[in-house]
Image (cartoon, rainbow, N blue to C red):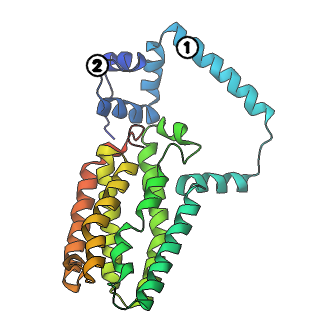
Amino acid sequence: MTTDHPTLSQLERYAAAGPGLDEPTVWAIEVHLEDCADCRARLAGSTTGDSRALVERVAVSLDREIAARPVPGGRSRSWSRLRHRWFVGTLAPWLAMTAAVLACAAVLTNLWTGLPSLVLLIAPLAPLPGVAVAWHRRADPAWELIAATPAAGMTTLLRRTAAVLAFVIPVLAIVGAGTGVSLALVLLPCLAFTVGTLVLGTLIGVRRAAAVLIAVWMLVVVAPSIAVARVPMLLEADGAGGWALATVVLSVVALLRMDGFRRLANHA
């Protein structure tokens, strides 16, 4: 966050719904206002009478609603806050489906020895359904609130992506060990595709990015591999280094594209 204070002209334009301000400038002003009381006071002086009256009416209405509700226990509030930051209930069926698909792939790999390892083929795609649901307006009841909060979209998406990986990676490790495939070739493509989904998601949306990567991988890699009963070169033992390099490069690109995660309202 920059330590430079926004100019009075910028604050006036921000108070008027941001005419003439690009998105990075709006985000920088919002983040600066979180920690600068002086600029918040200057912003309050820049608002119109109608805006101040609206804020006062909303504040009175919220005070009445808050006063009418019982205060929950501290422990339940802490758990609820943690659960919504790192997890959303609609992720559970998708994660269960992912585990079931991986288990079926492991069983089929062991039963039909003529097929290439199905676990190896679908491992890169395992986290993508969960990542797609982690940030989606129809899957999260608090989506509007999160999308309207400065920088909350990025942190929420990354936290929930980490929660998806924390579930998927152990499942992949178990089914991979059970089928005797290389753990590096199971886990590294999984990480590379996850980071790639986030990077592509800054351009076309996380849900669309996951769908595109799943469709391309199924058509270009999975279907031909099953047809010829052979593991592709991408997933052979010598490919682990390439997947590791791809993960590192995509992670660097994700850091450079960090501003694309700030406001995900248009990328759901």
Q: In front: 54, or 106?
A: 106
Q: Position of residue 17 (x, y in %)?
A: 41, 19
On the image, numbered disc 2 is attached to which residue?
20
Q: Position of residue 177 (x, y in %)?
A: 42, 88
Which-is-in-front pick, marks 2 and 1? 2
Q: Quadrant of residue 237?
A: bottom left
Does the residue at mark 2 contact the one at mark 1 (Cβ under 8 Å)? Answer: no
Q: Quadrant of residue 210?
A: bottom left
User: Who's the residue at 58% across and 62% down the image?
Assistant: 92
Q: Position of residue 233 (x, y in %)?
A: 19, 79
Cα distance, mark 2 to mark 1? Answer: 22 Å
Mark 2 element type: loop
Work out whether 245 lies above or below 238.
above
Quarter holding the C terminus is top left
Horizontally, is 242 left or right of 87 in the view?
left
Say which amino acid is labelled 2: Gly
Q: In front: 233, or 197?
A: 233
On the image, numbered disc 1 is attached to which residue?
52
Q: In front: 35, or 224?
A: 224
Q: In front: 104, or 263?
A: 104
Say which amino acid is labelled 1: Arg
Q: Position of residue 246 (x, y in %)?
A: 22, 67
Neighbour tally class for label 1: few under 14, some 14-19, many 20 plus, Cα within 10 Å: few
